[in-house]
Amino acid sequence: MHIFIKKPNLVKCQKCGHFIMPHIICQNCGYYKGVEVIDVLKKLTKKEKKLKQKEIAQNEAESKKEKGLSFEGLSKK
């Protein structure tokens, strides 16, 4: 049969590190190519805003660690 499903081509968001489709705004942080397009914190309550901000900060820190040049990072690539 010639009918099959392909795996989607996903890339990491530059800001938060979530996997998204290319050329699409990240629904997690609202950024596209390093520019904020959507304010995802606008409609959230205070508790939800704090949790979301912590999550985004944590993901940014993890993505910066991966970009750094270290023996572990180089060996993974």
Image (cartoon, grey):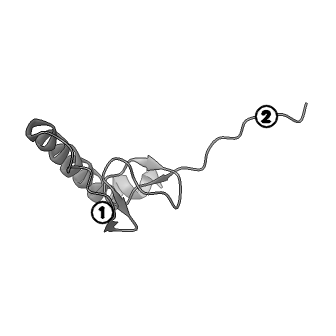
Q: Which residue occupies 27% across, 50% down?
A: 40
Residue drawn at the location 21% of the way across and 45% of the way down: 43
**Does dot 1 land on a helix, a strand or a loop?**
loop
Q: Which residue is disc 1 drawn over? A: 68
Kindly identify the amino acid type of the residue bearing the numbered disc 2.
Answer: Phe
Asked whether the residues under the numbered discs 1 and 2 touch, taking CB atoms below 8 Å apart as contact, a structural biologist would say no
Q: Residue furthest right?
A: 1
Distance of label 1 from label 2 (alpha carbons): 39 Å
Q: Which residue is mark 2?
A: 4
Who is closer to the viewer here, 3 or 39? 39
Label 1 Cα neighbours within 10 Å, binned few <14 / some 14-19 / many ≥20: few
Q: Position of residue 41 (x, y in %)?
A: 20, 49
Mark 1 or 2: the one toward you: 2
- The residue at the point 45 percent across, 47 percent down is 19
Q: Is residue 41 left or right of residue 35?
A: left
Question: Can you say which quadrant of the picture contains the N terminus?
Answer: top right
Q: Residue at x 20, y 51 (%)?
A: 42
Question: Measured along the vertical axis of the image, is residue 46 above or below residue 62?
Answer: above
Give residue 10's position: percent from left, percent from top. Answer: 54, 50
Location of residue 15 in the rendering, given as x and y in whole percent from the top left corner: 31, 59
**Amino acid type of the residue that numbered disc 1 sits on in the rendered structure:** Gly
30 or 64, which is in the foreground? 30
Nearer-N-terminus badge (1/2): 2
Quick one: 13 or 35, which is closer to the camera? 35
| Percent of width and height locating residue 17 | 36, 51
Mark number displayed over residue 41 = none
Secondary structure category for the residue under label 2: loop
